[in-house]
Image (cartoon, rainbow, N blue to C red):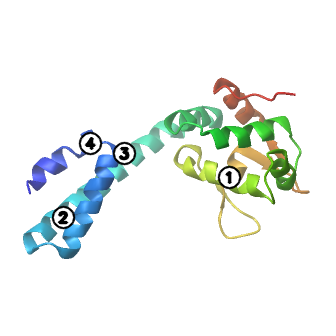
């Protein structure tokens, strides 16, 4: 294995190629020959260093941006799925609704809307950060990045976020 050649090409690899390389290197680190284990450790370290460097550059670039610009960037980097478009649209169309009401408007049960909305925000948290700590549980409150939750548990999209979604093609229909 030409470790130096592999490491030199890391920045040109897609995320899928990097993931595959990471998985292969971890296998070799755990079960390869001594030479393979040593090479695998170098590759894993280089992958970690590259990821940290790229993340640092992204954070530096996003640091001065308004949240609405970060939202646009987040949803362009990680495009909106059909389900995500529905959960955004239902909130835009029904501001001041509870999670249960939003879920029902989608034909879903319970508070499914909230779970999907929070997951959507989590998947883009690198762009949308920082998530505040949740008051009721020991976890980040990712949904609170894009929407406000009132004391009586009613959700409303933050105005600057609603404006960003207009640019992405989503707007209140009422």
Residue of label 1 = 116
The residue at which mark 2 appears reads as 40
Q: CA distance from mark 3 to mark 4?
A: 9 Å
Q: Nearer the viewer, residue 110 or 92?
A: 110
Residue 32 lies in what quarter of the image?
bottom left
Examine the rendering and report whether any part of residue 71 can be seen.
yes
- Distance from label 1 to label 4 (Cα)? 32 Å
Left or right: residue 100 versus residue 41 is right
The crowding category of the residue bearing disc 4, from other C-alpha atoms within 10 Å (few below 14, some 14 to 19, many at least 20), is some
**Of the residues tagged 3 and 4, which is closer to the observer?**
4
Q: Which residue is mark 4?
A: 11
N-term-proximal mark, 1 vs 2: 2
- Image coordinates for residue 105, horizontal then vertical, percent: 84, 45
Instruction: Please tell me how crowded label 1 is: few (under 14), some (14-19), or many (20+) other residues with Cα within 10 Å.
Output: some
Front residue of this view, candidates 116 and 59:
116
Farthest-out residue, front: 107
Residue under pointer 3: 54
Disc 4 to disc 2, C-alpha distance: 17 Å
- Which percent across, then down, holds residue 78? 52, 39
- State the residue at coordinates (75%, 56%): 112
**Is the C terminus in the top left, top right, bottom left or bottom right quadrant?**
top right
Q: Position of residue 83 (x, y in %)?
A: 66, 43
């Amino acid at each position: 294995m030409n470790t130096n050649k592999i490491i030199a090409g890391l920045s040109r690899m897609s995320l899928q190629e990097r993931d595959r390389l990471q998985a292969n290197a971890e296998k070799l680190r755990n079960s390869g020959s001594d030479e393979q284990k040593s090479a695998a450790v170098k590759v894993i370290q280089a992958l970690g260093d590259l990821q940290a460097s790229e993340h640092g550059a992204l954070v530096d670039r996003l640091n001065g941006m308004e949240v609405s610009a970060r939202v646009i960037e987040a949803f362009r980097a990680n495009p909106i799925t059909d389900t995500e478009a529905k959960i955004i649209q239902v909130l835009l169309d029904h501001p001041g609704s509870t999670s249960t009401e939003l879920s029902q408007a989608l034909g879903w049960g319970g508070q499914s809307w909230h779970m999907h909305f929070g997951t959507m925000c989590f998947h883009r948290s690198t762009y949308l950060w920082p998530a505040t700590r949740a008051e009721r549980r020991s976890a980040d409150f990712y949904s609170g990045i894009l929407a406000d939750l009132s004391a009586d548990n009613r959700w409303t999209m933050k105005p600057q976020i609603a404006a960003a979604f207009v640019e992405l093609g989503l707007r209140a229909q009422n």
